[in-house]
Amino acid sequence: MLLATQLLIGSAIGLVITTTGVGGGVILLPVLIYLFGMNALAAVATANLLSMLMKISSSYIHFRLGNIPLKPALLILGIMFPATFLASYGVTWLGSQPQYYEQVELGINILMIVAIIFSMFLFLQRIFKKSTSSHPLSSLAPSSSIPLSSLFVPGMSAGFVLGATGVGGGLVVLPVLMRFAQMNIKEAIGSSIFITTILSGGSAIAYSAGGYTDVHTAIILCLGSLISIPLARYLLVYLSERFFQYLTLLFILISIIMMSWKLIN
């Protein structure tokens, strides 16, 4: 594949990640599998490294725009990190055992689809709740006052899915932040990008120990993502919250179709 084509693909992926929080596993995995010919384990490993690299700049943009409430974001990060790290090492170890390799590949694909469908349910539930309430903001507790107990199980589950499949930001973490941490869409997007930047880094380290990561491809796509930063910043400032809700939902639906097609073929 030509270098210019790879940079263009990276630019498109970077734009999606920055504006919706979706992309780390959902867009990257099909791209790495179908366009770059990687197997599931290599795609998950490379997607985690690439997700971390791309989201560093995206996190900075959202931080400057005030879209990252640090206290709840750091709390959820602390809950998710152990599950993400352990899941990454577990999948890496199982994938290195020849007798388990095919089961691991199948398990990753099934878990991705289940996580995506469940996340869409949470996302639709939150949108419906806000649209049917006459005073949607008054019925929600501030994100900084959400108790730890209500975040523990969703956070651990999201961390496990991210570590095992590479699917995390917009599809798993974002709905958890909106549903259980009561963040609005822009706060949830910003916080999910910040959280998964660190989690993807930890997961990438675990996968790199197994030799599955394609560092060269990750770096080229990351450089391409930098091209889209000015456009992403403009869209985040001038477009409405409702627009980002529908855009995120669109990518969730696309991801369900793509991953289901991969599983049945």
Image (cartoon, rainbow, N blue to C red):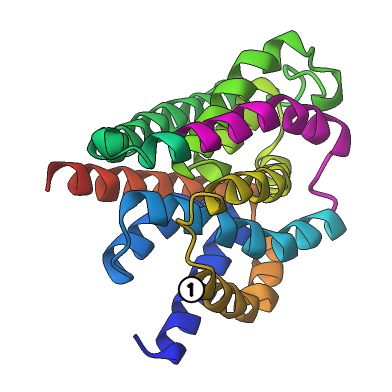
Q: Residue at x 69, y 17 (%)?
A: 151
On the image, the x and y values in percent for residue 171 come to 49, 40
| Magenta highlight: main SS | helix
User: Which residue is at the front of the view, 169 or 236?
Assistant: 169
Q: Which residue is denoted by mark 1 in the rendering?
A: 217
- In this figure, what is the number of numbered marks? 1
The structure residue drawn at horizontal position 79% and vertical position 48%, both measured from the top left corner, is: 67
Queried whether the magenta region covers residue 117, the answer comes back as no
Is residue 71 one of those drawn in magenta? yes
The three-letter amino acid code for the residue at tag 1 is Thr
Q: Is residue 195 above or below residue 30?
A: above
Eyeballing the image, is 154 above or below 85? above
- In the picture, the quarter occupied by the N terminus is bottom left
For residue 74, side relative to residue 241 (left or right): right
Residue depicted at x 57% and y 44%: 169
Look at the image and tell me whether residue 239 can be seen.
Answer: no
Q: Is residue 233 left or right of residue 94?
A: right
Residue 218 image position (x, y, % from top left)? 53, 69
**Residue 124 in the figure: left or right of residue 34:** right
- Residue 232 visible here: yes
Q: Quadrant of residue 139?
A: top right
Q: Quadrant of residue 83?
A: top right
Element type where label 1 sits in the image: helix
* Number of residues whose C-alpha sits closer than 10 Å to that of mark 1, classed few (under 14), some (14–19) or many (20 or more): some
Is residue 75 placed above or below 145 in the rendered structure? below
Of residues 185 and 87, the one nearer the viewer is 87
Q: Residue at x 45, y 90 (%)?
A: 4
Res 144 quadrant in image: top right
From which residue to which does the magenta span run?
66-90
State the residue lying farthest toward the left.
Answer: 265
